[in-house]
Image (spheres, rainbow, N blue to C red):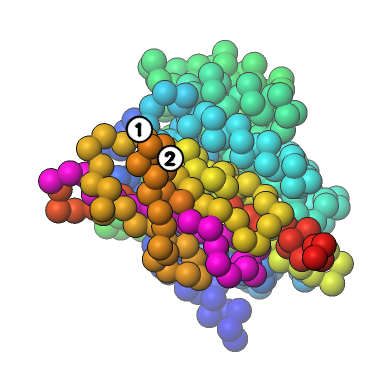
Amino acid sequence: MKLILSIFLILIAPAISVLGHGPTDHGEAHQISISTAQNAEQSDTTTPTSPATPSTPTALSVTPTAPGTVTGNDGIRVTVLGYHDFSATKKATEMLISTEKFGKQMQAIKELGLNVISMEDFMAWKRGEKKVQDKSVVITIDDGWKSVYTEAYPILKKHKFPFTLFLYSKYIDGGASALTTKMIKEMQKNGCTIGSHSISHPYPATVKAERAKGTEKFVTYLRKEMGGSRKVLEAKFGGKVTTYAYPGGYFTGEMLPVATESGYEFLFTVLPGKTTSATSNFTIPRYIILGTHDYIFRNATSFGATSTSAATDGAIVQSTPHPVEPQPGALITTRLPKISADLSKVEKIDVESIVMRVAGFGKVPATYDVSSKTISWTLNRRLRSRTCEVSVQWRNMGATKYQKPMAWIFRIDREAAYQPTSP
């Protein structure tokens, strides 16, 4: 009964967590983009199964399992990452990540020993045709920004990481900021596969307006956006396009039978969580990696222990505007470290206002060295957690409000830290 209810809710209610980023955005994406960052990580549990092909495209009836759906859980967990735009020079935003940070994230995946798999292998695993390693990673990139080719592609190629582009066909060859057909075809030769992201990347307000016109007109609209995009992409780039990423993560019940009719087998959301063999093929979770929320990548690369697999702590990939020690993400071997922040480049800082906070300790009695313009504090009680979060905040001279806190996390090698020391 719970399963039937869950499927029913999926069909009648649109997803509430949506985000987007594209040249056709008229401001809506700015308001909804951080909803994914606010979502709690979903547990590795079974999600509702996919709807079977309905008798008519507009029908909303479902059966418990669809052909090709794996029943049960094989214990394998896959994390799907979603990116958008990249830049080596622009300031990071929710949808834009710095090239440097992206490079560090890809290196971190390698160092963690996580297995990056292709979309082809992911689909074969979900169909029950192939085994993949537990704690595997799928890399996806939405929209079709030119920066994928100029910034991300060289890094992915260097690591020999396969990746999938979810393209909305209207934007291909769409101007100075868009990927060209030639660029995409070159990337296809080096690990890139193509998925659909609709024709025009409609935002929720547009979809709602079309839905308000009635079921028949709405289904016609969906067939154009979903089915039409697939036809264009297959004609341009060859092969079969069987994956679809909901624009903005927004979906309604009417989209599911249209997706099946259009030839899509796997549809991706923006809801965070690990994918299992029992996850619905129509609501596959993704961690959308936002340029301003470092913890999302950490959650995406964290895996709890199972009866057959040890836990993996997620990668901490951060940067701070001013030098700090221990550095962001650093692994230290002492549980009584000295924590410091070099504020020499901060202009007109009100020294008396500087505050350092350490997780588990709160506000600490840090000392400011006038000559080096560095604030520091040495712990007086041993750290017991695997990670430690620090924040430093200050006011500028004459200001009444504090600047945004500078926060970072470092790691503690507990095995090394707990080794006995000589008297």
Q: Residue at x 73, y 29 (%)?
A: 159
Q: Residue at x 71, y 20 (%)?
A: 189
Specify the quadrant that holds the C terminus. bottom right
Mark 2 and mark 1 in contact? Answer it, CB < 8 Å.
yes
Give the image location of residue 125, x and y in percent: 79, 52
Q: Specify the label residue 342 is tagged with.
A: 2
The quadrant holding residue 116 is: top right
Give the image location of residue 124, x and y in percent: 79, 48
Nearest to the observer: residue 227 or residue 384: 384
**83 with respect to 349 (left or right):** right
**307 with respect to 358 (left or right):** right
Nearest to the observer: residue 91 or residue 66: 91
Can residue 56 be seen here? The reply is no
Give the image location of residue 270, x and y in percent: 50, 53
Q: Is residue 387 magenta?
A: yes
Residue interval drawn in magenta: 377-398
Vertical placement of 184 versus 378: above or below? above
Q: Amino acid at mark 2?
A: Asp
Q: Marks 2/1: CA distance?
A: 8 Å
Can residue 382 be seen here? The reply is yes
Specify the quadrant that holds the N terminus. bottom right
Please give the residue where the numbered disc 1 appears in the rendered image.
Answer: 345
Secondary structure at badge 2 equals: strand
Q: Is residue 410 magenta?
A: no
Q: Residue furthest top?
A: 182
Q: Amino acid at mark 1?
A: Lys
Q: Specify the label residue 417 is tagged with.
A: none
Q: Residue at x 40, y 54 (%)?
A: 367
Nearest to the observer: residue 299 or residue 77: 299
